[in-house]
Amino acid sequence: MDFIQVLTKIKSAHQDDNDLLGAFEVFDREDKGFFRLRELEDALAKIPGSDLVTECELAEVLQLADPDGDGQVKFEG
C-alpha cells in the first residue's frame, strides 16, 4: 500500500467530522481555523517510512491539503 492509499484509508476510516476536527486542532493550536502547509509537510517528514514517499506522492498530499495554493490548510467540515 502506498502513502496516498494509507492517507485515503485513514480519511475514510474517520467518517465523523469531529474526529477529523480533533486531528486538525493538533496543528491549529491558536484556533485560527488554519495552519501553515509547511507544518504539515514537516510532520509528514517525521513519520517512520516517510523516506519511501516519492516527491510526487508528497506533492499530491500537499495539493489535497491546500487546494487553493495559499500555503494554509483549512478545515472544511
Image (tube, grey):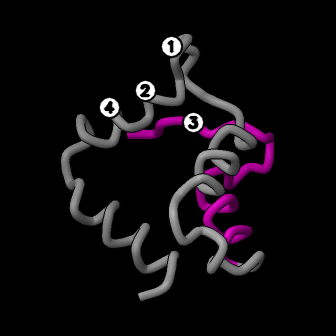
From the viewer's perspective, is the residue at label 3 or at label 1 nearer? 1
Between the residue at mark 4 and the residue at mark 3, the CA separation in whole angstroms equals: 13 Å
Between the residue at mark 4 and the residue at mark 2, the CA separation in whole angstroms equals: 5 Å
Q: Which residue is mark 4?
A: 22
**Circles 4 and 3: CB atoms closer than 8 Å:** no
> Which residue in the rendered view is the most extreme toward the bottom?
1
Label 4: element kind: helix
Q: Earlier in the sequence, mark 1 or mark 2?
A: 2
Q: x, y (%) of residue 42?
A: 69, 46
Q: Quick check: is 76 in the magenta stretch? A: yes
Q: Nearer the viewer, residue 54 or 66?
A: 54
Q: Quick check: is 67 in the magenta stretch? A: yes
Q: Nearer the viewer, residue 3 or 37?
A: 3
Magenta region: which residues? Answer: 57-77
Image mark for residue 74:
3
Amino acid type assigned to the residue bearing label 4 in the image: Gly
Image mark for residue 25:
2
Image quadrant in which you'd find residue 19 = top left
Q: Which residue is mark 1?
A: 31
**What residue do we see at 52% from left, 17% from top?**
29
Between the residue at mark 4 and the residue at mark 1, the CA separation in whole angstroms equals: 12 Å
**Circles 1 and 2: CB atoms closer than 8 Å:** yes
